[in-house]
Amino acid sequence: MKQIFTLLFVSLFCYGAKAQTCADFAVQLTATTQVSPARITLRWKPLSDTNIYKVYKKTKASLTWSASMVTLHSFDSAYTDTTVIVDSAYEYFVAADHYVGGTYKWTATGYIYAGIKSPAMHSKGGLVLMVDSTYVDSCADGLHKLMKDISGDGWQIFRHDVSRSLNDTAVKRLIKADYTNNANVKAVLLVGHVAVPYSGDLNPDGHPDHLGAWPADVYYADLTGTWTDAAVSDTASPYSWTKNGPGDGKWDQTQIPALTALQVSRIDLYNMPAFASTDIQRMRNYLAKDHIYKMDSLYVRRSAIVSDNFGVFTLSSGGHEAFASTAWRSFPPMLTRDSIAPTSALIQNLDTASFQWAYGCGGGSFSSAGGIGATSDFASHNMKGIFTVLFGSYFGDWNVSNNFLRAPLCSNTPALTSCWAGRPNWYFHHMGLGENIGFSTWWSQNNDGGIYGPSDVGINQWVHVALMGDLTLRNQYIKPATNLVITHTALHGANLSWTASADASVLGYYVYRATSEFGNYQKISGMVTTLTFHDTVGSDGLKFYMVRPVKLQTTPSGAYYNLGIGITDSATVSFNHVAVENVSVSFDFNLYPNPASNVINVAIDAQATSTATLSLVNIKGERFATATKQIQQGANVFSLQVADLPAGIYTVQVTAGANTMVKKWIKL
């Protein structure tokens, strides 16, 4: 392992011949879509000295790419995929082989998650919220808004208030218990200076004096791997916190032992004395800006700036490192190619103008990056960006005083997330169709170099990959509905009314119900185009209702149905319990993965308990399989085996009560 560290040091500080620019290592992808006939057209900026482009495709959840769909020539800059259907999304990978003087030099890569009216994501899963007890009372209002916003975005919340003195193994036990007892837990958000795990014998920045244990929040996300504290014995570092010995409470693992189950991030503004504000004031400020952004009330330019003070380096192995290619690869699917601009004054630009994304890299220290600035500059300037991506020596080791990586989140007008991207690269392209940045973190941590590339320096799946800030944040929000009012009469359920969203593009609203304020909200309506809803079927008792607006959001990755943050209220209600068989059951369903090879999952959200019939039908109307299932009120998931079906376009038909719905899917 230490031989690898030596290579890293040489590659970063003993530069080989410079190549071109980091943009030459990224295929800058965007997509346009068409509903009828259904098609997705990928477009990219042509790269010089490129002989061929290869296009690959997979489902969002797949760990492998299909065989190359097509090989294109150097003069091509677009590809149209007609093997797609409406209400679906697909992930694409374009590889461009680069030649100089007829000799192969490198492969530029680009990724996009593109869709045609990609379905709304009503439920994100469960989120474990670990709150540093320092903030329980002092930031109570901000924490409650944070929980309301997270819940309103489709997450079920499991909260724990913990002391800063509680060690990482005890914190993880709480997380694992929630994961074990609740089938849908997907994320953990650490608010405050919750115990910081340290692990490994690594120095991804290449400095021999920085070899040892690094902060490893990914420890909380891995619930199946084995973590040990017996093998590593490295105490040579001059920095006390990186020394790692057997039995000292720091873990041995340099790479994650298993693919992580959870998304993970932290909002930690502790020990930043360069800022005049107190720890508590900084947390209040962060939580307030986080809320304003999610309400679509913070002005944001849908553009990005890139300050690259490293450029491209050739390794002794013949490979290359292009740290800023993370920006040139990930930003176009979210913002368009023309919305990204280089800059030599990142902090100064963010002080005076608003950008959604910002990338900066340069030779670093714990509190600075060459060509970017220092923590003190963040303290004296606003950071009018939402998502900040930084890279440089030392400061990726973030649990130190006045750390440069955490500094943007402490500014008076703070950036809301920050991460250390370059070793390895990060991949944010799923956010172009509405995913949260925690999903990007999860993929970037689990990427083995084969799913997403490049991986020339071989540090994929190392434990240092971490996100600072709120993992639930997304690129696009819409203004919520307001003034939810619930009236109820005995045996007649609940009548809901609300004031429309101020967003003129809203198509309608969805209504959800739960049994607790931050519980598992189940969709109980189709899209409602009025400002009222009558809930007539359910169990008696205290119910919490939520209303969310929806619009068709167009982005450089296609179009998806974007849900706003929900508004909630509660009421004690009772229903007229007629026989379920006589009720016309309201339901909706989604299919995943789509396309599918072996198994397709049918996820049904039903307003009431009923019997449902599921059928597989091909385009000729031939029925291949029929199954009868009992569905419960709320979420239901059934798996259908499709491995033996011929490739082609099919439909799944679901009938419940008097209602039938049909959706298309593709068999690969």
Image (tube, rainbow, N blue to C red):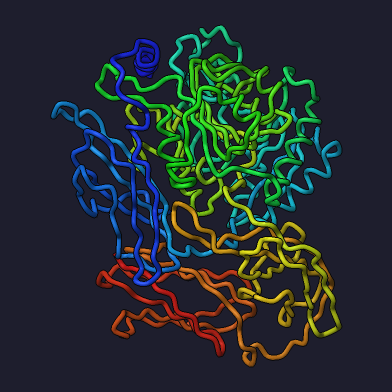
Identify which residue is drawn at 21% across, 44% down: 75
Identify which residue is drawn at 35% across, 16% down: 11
Quarter of the image where the C terminus is located: bottom left
Q: Is residue 630 positioned above or below 507 on the image?
A: below
Q: Is residue 405 visible?
A: yes
In front here: 245 or 84?
A: 84
Q: Residue furthest left?
A: 102
Q: Is residue 328 positioned above or below 379 on the image?
A: below
Q: Is residue 445 visible?
A: no
Q: Residue furthest bottom?
A: 582
Q: Quadrant of residue 591?
A: bottom left
Quarter of the image where the N terminus is located: top left
- Left or right placement of residue 106 versus residue 485 in this view: left
Residue 355: percent from the left, percent from the top? 58, 38
Identify which residue is drawn at 72% across, 90% down: 578
How many numbered circles are shown? 0
Residue 565: percent from the left, percent from the top? 68, 57
- Left or right placement of residue 226 versus residue 619 in this view: right
Q: Is residue 308 positioned above or below 484 on the image?
A: above
- Left or right placement of residue 326 versus residue 644 in this view: right
Residue 502: percent from the left, percent from the top? 71, 61
Identify which residue is drawn at 25% across, 72% down: 646
Residue 201: percent from the left, percent from the top? 47, 19
Q: Is residue 430 positioned above or below 370 on the image?
A: below
